Image (spheres, helix red, strand yellow):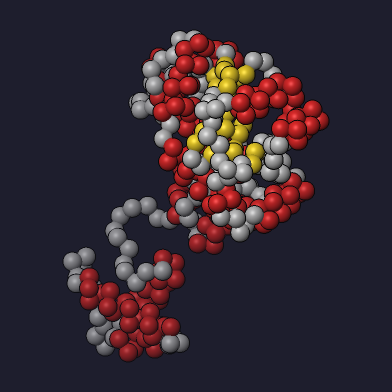
Amino acid sequence: MNRLRFPNANANRAARAFLRGRVIGQMDLGSSATEIAGRLNLSVRTVQRWIRQFRVTGSILPQKPGGSVKKTTPRADRLLIRLAKRHRLSSAREVLQMWQERVSVQTVYRRWLTKRLRRYRLVKRPMLSAQQKLNRYQWANARVLWRANMWNRIVWTDESRIRLHSNDGRSRVTRERGERFRDDCIAKTVTAGGGSVHIWAGIWHDGRSEIQVLQGNVTGNSYIIVLQHFLNNNNNDKPENWILQDDNAPPHRAQVVNRFKQEAGIRSIPWPARSPDLNPIEHVWDYLKRRLNAGPFIPNLANLTIRIREEWANMPQNFVQNLINSMNRRIQAVILANGGYTRY
């Protein structure tokens, strides 16, 4: 019996792919390799080889000539992915020891990439207890129906410490191998960042307060002075029926501060602990620090204070508005995370 063969690599690939497809189709219908070979005038070994290749690669196309042979099976690859997700903090070399396959670390990385797994820097977030997650969930759930007219009444406030010399971890450098310690390839640091400026400010949908520079650590009494200055500043066109947002730092919740707020008629929104992702002003601090790092060299703290005030005054108000308009999305993210961490 004359059997169809492909004597060289220049055979018609389209015809071969069509024939392989017929083999796989008949296999799916339950035919054996012997039955398929008889119908299509092929050798049984050829049919078996094509079926075996389809089960391994998932493709009816022939493998390209050349290249290294895959040293691991699909089952072993699935085990690697499970190990990587089960031990997320382990390095590729540590996962390879658990995997116990005789391959290189680079093979581990290549297998990860097929499942879109890569090594990333850990995101830093405040530690949340089960009770704190519950409080965040309940806080968000109580405000899930709030709309712009409510969020626009809130004055979002916070303190921030801006260092004279800092590296936010975003910087990258283009260099060759072996140039790691070139003078122009190094992020230079100084002790305590060369000093810092401690500031307080507030934002709302249609405006912002002035920057207040704080001296020393914040106490209950010094926080009262900050609030008095904010209330008495005629340049602060605060929203109608505004509500103050401040976090649960001890100075903000001191008894003297609570009495002052009550006497001054300041209403505060309750705040869940360890929830910077719910405060839009955190992104303002990040914006401010990036603008300062991208600008010209700042020689001392006096110049840093001047630059902070300049960047604060030049910050677009629509940037602030977009942050406050994101509150409903932040609320939804907290609810979906059951009070856990969000991307904000």
Identify the residue at image location x=70%, y=21%.
222
- Confirm whether residue 210 shows in the render: yes
122 left or right, relative to 106: right
Identify the residue at image location x=38%, y=79%.
24
123 or 118, which lies in front? 123
Residue 292 image position (x, y, % from top left): 44, 23
Residue 151 image position (x, y, % from top left): 57, 48
Q: Is residue 336 above or below residue 280?
A: below
Q: Is residue 295 above or below residue 83?
A: above
Identify the residue at image location x=51%, y=28%.
235
Residue 8 image position (x, y, % from top left): 21, 67
Rendered-image quadrant of the C terminus: top right
The image quarter containing residue 176 is top left
Q: Is residue 39 above or below residue 200?
A: below
Identify the residue at image location x=31%, y=67%.
62
93 left or right, relative to 298: right
64 or 336, which lies in front? 336
- Confirm whether residue 45 shows in the render: no
Residue closest to the far right: 255
Rendered-image quadrant of the N terminus: bottom left
Q: Is residue 48 above or below residue 203?
A: below
The image quarter containing residue 25 is bottom left
148 or 169, which lies in front? 148
